[in-house]
Image (cartoon, grey):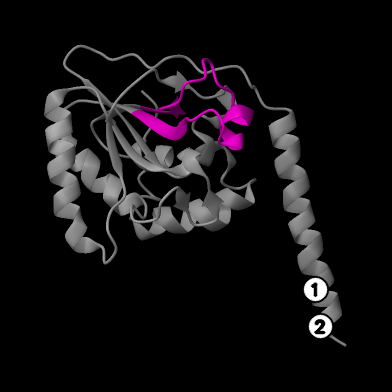
Amino acid sequence: MKIKPVLYSVAIVALTFTYFSNQLVMSADKSPAKMPQVPEGHEQISLGAGCFWCIEAIYNRLDGVKSAVSGYTGGAVKNPTYQDICTGASGHAEVVHIVYDPNVISTETILAWFWKAHDPTTLNRQGNDVGTQYRSAIYYYTVAQRKVAEASRSAAQKDFKSPIVTEITKTGKFYPGEVYHQDYYRQNKSKNSYCRFIIAPKMEKLGLEDKEKVAE
C-alpha cells in the first residue's frame, strides 16, 4: 500500500519534465542556425552518432575545435526541418558539423572521440533513439579524410565484439539545424531530462563534464 504514493510521485515528476521540455520547444527559435565558417588552415567534417545534442557537447569541449554545429546531411530533401528528420523519410542523418584546426587536433583524434562517443555496431540506432536519422556515419570532405576514416574504422573494430556498421561517405549538402538545437546541452542540462539522464552521465564517463570551453 505504501508503493502507490511513490509511483504517483514518479509519475508527477515525469509529467513535469515532459511539460517543461515541451514548453521549451514551443517557445524555441526554430529558424536555421548560421552556416559555420571555415577559417584558413582549418578543416571540416560531419559526424553522425545518434542524437546530435550529445555529440555536439563532446566536440565543443575539445581543444582545437573551432565550432561544432548540429544539423542534417545525407538526404535528398532540400532545407529539411527537425520535423522532417524525425519522420526518417527525408533521408538525412542528425550530424554535428565540426570545424577544427589540424595543427591542434588531428583528424585521427577527432575520430578517436567519435568511436568513444557512441556504439557504432547498432544499425540505425543509439539506445532508445531509433531510425535512419540516428545512423552512425562519417561524412568526409577530402580524400585524405576518407583514408584516415577508413583506417580509423578498421583500427576501432578491435574494441567492439560486433561488426562496426558506420558508413563513410563523401559529404553532400549540410543544413544547420534550428537555433534552439545549438549548444543544447550547455543551455538545457538543468532543465531537460534527456540532458540530465542521458548526456550528463556520458560526459562524466568521458571525463568532459568539467572541461566546458568559453565560446570563441
Placement of 73 over or under 78, stated as above or below: below
Q: Quadrant of residue 181?
A: top right
Across and down, in percent, residue 75 comes to 45, 25
Q: Residues within 10 Å of mark 2 (few under 14, many from 20)?
A: few
Residue at x-position 49% and y-position 57%: 127
Residue at x-position 42% and y-position 40%: 57
Residue occupied by mark 1:
7
Count the labels in the image. 2
Q: Nearer the viewer, residue 188 or 134?
A: 134
Q: Nearer the viewer, residue 62 or 34?
A: 34
Residue occupied by mark 2:
3
Placement of 157 over or under 60, stated as above or below: below
Residue type for callout 1: Leu
Residue type for callout 2: Ile
Location of the C terminus (image quadrant): top left
Q: Give the magenta part as a residue range.
A: 68-97
* Residue 158 falls within the magenta-colored stretch: no
Across and down, in percent, residue 187 comes to 56, 37
Residue at x-position 20% and y-position 19%: 42
Location of the N terminus (image quadrant): bottom right
